Image: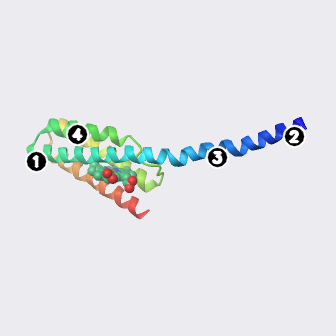
Amino acid sequence: MRTRLTLLACAIAIVLIPATFSRSDATEQPERRSEIQKSDMQKKLDYSKNILDGLVTEDFDKIIANAQSLNTLGKRKWMQNDSIAYRTQNQVFWFTTGTLITAGEQKNLDGAMLSYTQMMHACVNCHQLIRRQ
Ligand code: HEC
């Protein structure tokens, strides 16, 4: 009798414990993740506008500071998406923020403009592929 009760308790625990964990995964995490994502993306938009401002006014300090902020954000993973296409755009985005910093440090306006254009391609391409997936 005692063994049976213990077995029953174990069986209930085996059924209930994973259910509790998976519920918290399903309800809390995606919400929190999408909030982080939204504020990160809004920041990205602001930083990239600031870079455009820096390019047209030849303000290299502004270009460097904002490219550095984007570079830091580029190291983050924005969503659970491990497709090669997504990772490639993420990599291109991160890499071009680096070349933008270098061009800014060298006060190379043409180089900065080129890197900015390449970076903006990654912005648009990544969003396009997410919509198509
Ligand atoms: C490697 C992928 C990737 C790159 C590169 C990328 N984003 Fe995003 N972006 C995302 C994802 C993922 C979302 C969230 C989409 C969703 O949840 O619908 C998003 C959403 C956004 C949003 C909407 C946020 C909101 O309030 O809903 C903006 C604005 C944005 N990105 C700006 C940018 C800018 C500007 C760049 C380039 C400087 C950029 N993104 C580069 C992946 C990327």
Q: Residue at x 18, y 39 (%)?
A: 104
Residue highlighted by disc 2: 4
Q: Which-is-in-front pick, marks 1 and 2?
A: 2
Indicate which disc, 4 or 3, sits on the residue closer to the N terminus. 3
Q: Earlier in the sequence, mark 4 or mark 2?
A: 2
Above or below for 132 versus 93: below
Which residue is depicted at the point 72% across and 40% down? 13
* Dots 1, 4 in contact, CB < 8 A: no
Q: Quadrant of the C terminus?
A: bottom left
What is the C-alpha distance between the residues marked 1 and 2? 78 Å
Give above or below for 85 relative to 55: below
Q: CA distance from mark 4 to mark 2?
A: 65 Å
> Type of residue at label 3?
Ala
Real-space Cα distance between discs 1 and 4? 14 Å
- Disc 4 is placed on an element classified as helix
Q: Quadrant of the N terminus?
A: top right
Three-letter code, disc 4: Asn
Residue 33 falls left or right of residue 74: right
User: In this view of the protein, which residue sits in the foreground, 114 or 72?
Assistant: 72
Quadrant in which residue 50 is drawn: top left
Q: Which residue is mark 4?
A: 66
- Residue 2, above or below 34: above
The one nearer the camera, 23 or 73, is 23
Residue most extreme to the bottom: 132
- Give the mark nearest the N terminus, 3 or 2: 2
Q: Are marks 3 and 2 in contact (CB under 8 Å)?
A: no
As drawn, the label of residue 56 is 1
Label 3 with label 1: CB-CB less than 8 Å:
no
Kindly identify which residue carries mark 3.
Answer: 19
Colour pattern: rainbow
